[in-house]
Every structure is written in C-alpha cells, then in structure tokens.
Image: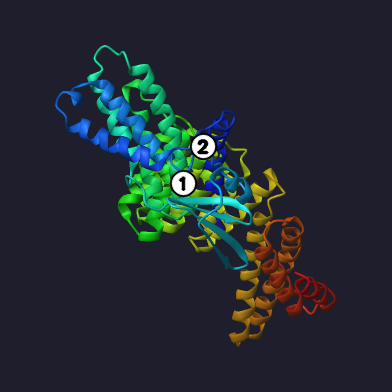
Amino acid sequence: MKKFVTLAIVATIVFSLKAQEASTVVLLNYNSVKKKVEKSDAEAQDPKKNAKAATWQKRGEIYQDVFMIGLEQLSEGMDPSTVKLFYKEPNSTDTETIEGVESETFIYDHMSYTFVNGALQDWKKLDPIVDNPLRVATDAYVKALELDEKGKITPKVKENLAELKNQLKRDGVNFYYSEDYDNALGAFENVLEINDMDVFAAEMDTTMVQYSGIIAREIAAKTDNKELYLKAIEYYKQLTEVGFGGSNTYLQIKMDYIAIGDTLKALDILKEAYEKYPDTVNIIANIADTYIQLKQYDEGIEYMAYVIEKNPNLAESYYWNGRLLINKEDTEFIDKAIESYKKSAELDPTIYYVWYDVGYIYYLQGEDFYDRSNTEEHVPTRDKLIELGKEKYMEAIPVLEKAYELNIENSTVKFETLDLLQRIYYKEQMMEEYERVKELKTTM
C-alpha cells in the first residue's frame, strides 16, 4: 500500500502535468534523441563550442528530452487502454497479485508501465540512454548561466529550469512509488538545488523541503542512518524559520532527535516550539512527557509552573503537572498531583484522562490499604485499613464512571476503566454493578 504522503506529492504535481495534455504532444524517437545526445557529448568536449552558453542550453534541453522518452503522454492514474492509445500494444504483459491487489505491467522496447487496480502506478526505463539525464540537464543549465554574461539566454534557461523542476518532482514521485527512496530523495534535493540558484532568487519550495525531510527520515528509519535523521532535522528547521507546518513541524524534529537518542535536544526543540506556540496543548504535553522520559521530574514540575504562570486557564497544563508530580511517588506529591488534576477538571471537565488518572490513583490507594490489611495482625489497625481501602474505592467509583462516560476516542483506556470498576465492584460485593460492567466489557 502506498503512503499518503506520496498522494500528497502527486496532488501537487499533477496539475502541471495535466497542463501538458491540453496541447498535442509528439512522441520522442529514441534513436533520434540518442544521436542528439552523442552530438551534444562531442560538443561539450569541443573547446570552441563548449565556450558558448547556447551549447549548454541546448544540451540541457536534449537531456530533458531524454528523460521525457516514454512519458510524453503519461499522467498519474492513467488507465491501461489510454496508455495503449498513445503507445500502442505492449510487447508483452505481466500480471501479479499480492495480498489481493492485482498489478499489470506493460513492457515496451524502452519502457515498462505498471498498473494497480486499473490505474497507472509507476513506470521504469528499461534501457535509458543516460542513467540520470536530469542531473546532466541541471549541470548544463548551470554552465549556460555561468557563460551567459550578458543575460541573453537567461530568461529561456530559467523557463527550462522551471520545467526541469517539474520533471524532477515527477521523477521523485515515481522513485517513491517504486520504493527507491535514495533516488527519490536525490530528485527532490535537486529541485532544492535549482531553487538556490540566483536566477530563482533563492526561492524556497516548502513542499519539496518537507518531502525531502520525509524521505530522508524514511530512509533513516529503514537503514538506522543517523546522518539522514540529522539531514531530515535540518530540512524541518528550514520550515520552522518560515512558519511552515506550525507546531507540527517542531514535533517532527523532536521525533527525529528521539530516534537518534538525543532526548535533550528533543526537549530543547520543544521548548523553542513552546515559545512560538504557547497555547498548543500537544507541545506542552510533549515537553512534560519528555521530562518524564528523562526522569527529570523536578525540572519538569518547574517548567510546568512556568507554563501555568503564562496561561493559568489551560486545563492540559495542570494535567501534565499532575503527571509529573505523581512520578515523584511520595505521599505529599500524590496529594499535590490530585489537586492539580482537580484544577484541570475544573477548567475543562470533558477531558476523560484527567478523570481516569484520578480514579486510578484512588484505586491504587484503596488496593494498598486492602493489601496491608491482609497482613496486619492487630485487629483495630486491620479494621481501620479496610475502612480506608473501602473509602478510597468509593471515591474511585464516580470518578472512573465519569472517565468511562467521557471517553469516546480511546478504546484501550475505556476497557481499562471498566476493568478497574469491575475489580472494585467485586471487592465491595456490589454485584449488580459488577455484572453491568462485566457485560460492557464483553461488548467492546
């Protein structure tokens, strides 16, 4: 199954490709283009001709044609009959079914086209004239601009480069579909390289920066390559500088730092995000959770105090303050945690996990009293422990019932809530409620 991000890339590019379909496109002849390549290669070595900007402009155009062989009339999602209409009957056809998904591949002299569920998915050049023609085209245009001191051909070269960027995006998408992530990343990075040229005034293509980061991360995850994670981080930091993606961009950077084991830098980038987006709950939650991972509870509590001071009306801040306090485990901090949870519920009584956490704390306290009573030989003390255990269980019941009622999104926590209630009702011999909760569990 192809990833959603690829579909997003395609959506960005298809418009430019469909624009080509509005006019009649003449199919390129493989042998004719090959001869032009040979002639261009010779001119690139000729001292007289290689000193002219026009030579390099022409070379760029020829190599763009090399890339376009077999793609002139192609568009994403094209059906097999339309491909046959433009490129005639294939030499042969291969079919394959994997996990119930049927694919069909048309094989021609120089190209193959693969369709999944009747729609074009990707293509492959079988005997390319040159392995990476768009790289050659890019270098040729760089040379043309360098030699064009009076700027006579610069407008045309810029126009060609704009089209070249579209071709690189198209190439990158195809590589991505084919799960050739290295070449996909190379194609997108080539677009960024073109954008850095003076002729584009260092134009920033945020979409390509984003996808370069995504693909660098995907390769890193598959190969455990730390350098590629760092490359992804640098791409995403470029996006933060222009505000692209908002707080989510910072969260992506945080995940990359976590992936390479640098939790402290993950925390630093989250704090930077907080200063930009102080009311973003997800950032606050990630900061607190990262402090918990680091076991830096005191520092986390101190930071939550800073967050609460900046915005004392944000319920989530009190919740995460409670999470940090509960990790301190000492009784005084448990009481403070419950106090913080209650403040959160006061500000926003609809947050189910606030109620769940408080109910769970009461349950654990009750369980502890009951466990201690089992080994206590002094009868008055044992009776007191049982009384305290019952008291905590009774406190837990309405809170956990509230958590269950509010929770419409997390089935795991919902089941755990019912499980806690079932234990409490059984212990207290509230059998009607026990059976009700038991039945609810079986229907989940």
Residue drawn at (56%, 46%), measured in percent from left and top?
Answer: 7
Residue on which the image places disc 2: 245
> Looking at the rendering, which quadrant does residue 436 occupy?
bottom right
Question: Residue 248, image x and y in percent?
Answer: 51, 42
Q: Residue furthest right?
A: 432
- Mark carried by residue 252: 1
Above or below, 422 against 125 in this view is below
Give the quarter of the figure containing the C terminus: bottom right
Mark 2: few, some, or many residues within 10 Å (few <14, many ≥20)? some
| Viewer-proximal residue among 320 and 245 | 245
Lateral position of residue 347 relative to residue 337, left or right: right
Residue drawn at (32%, 54%), measured in percent from left and top?
Answer: 226
Residue drawn at (43%, 44%), measured in percent from left and top?
Answer: 172
- Closer to the chain start, of discs 1 and 2, is 2
Residue 23 seen in render:
yes
SS category of the residue bearing label 1? helix
Lateral position of residue 174 relative to residue 117, left or right: left
SS category of the residue bearing label 2? loop
Mark 1: few, some, or many residues within 10 Å (few <14, many ≥20)? many
Calculate the distance from the C-alpha at mark 1 to the C-alpha at mark 2. 10 Å
- Mark carried by residue 217: none
Question: Residue 259, image x and y in percent?
Answer: 39, 56
Asked if disc 1 and disc 2 are in contact, CB closer than 8 Å, the reply is: yes
Q: Amino acid at mark 2?
A: Gly
| Viewer-proximal residue among 403 and 221 | 221
Residue 209 seen in render:
no
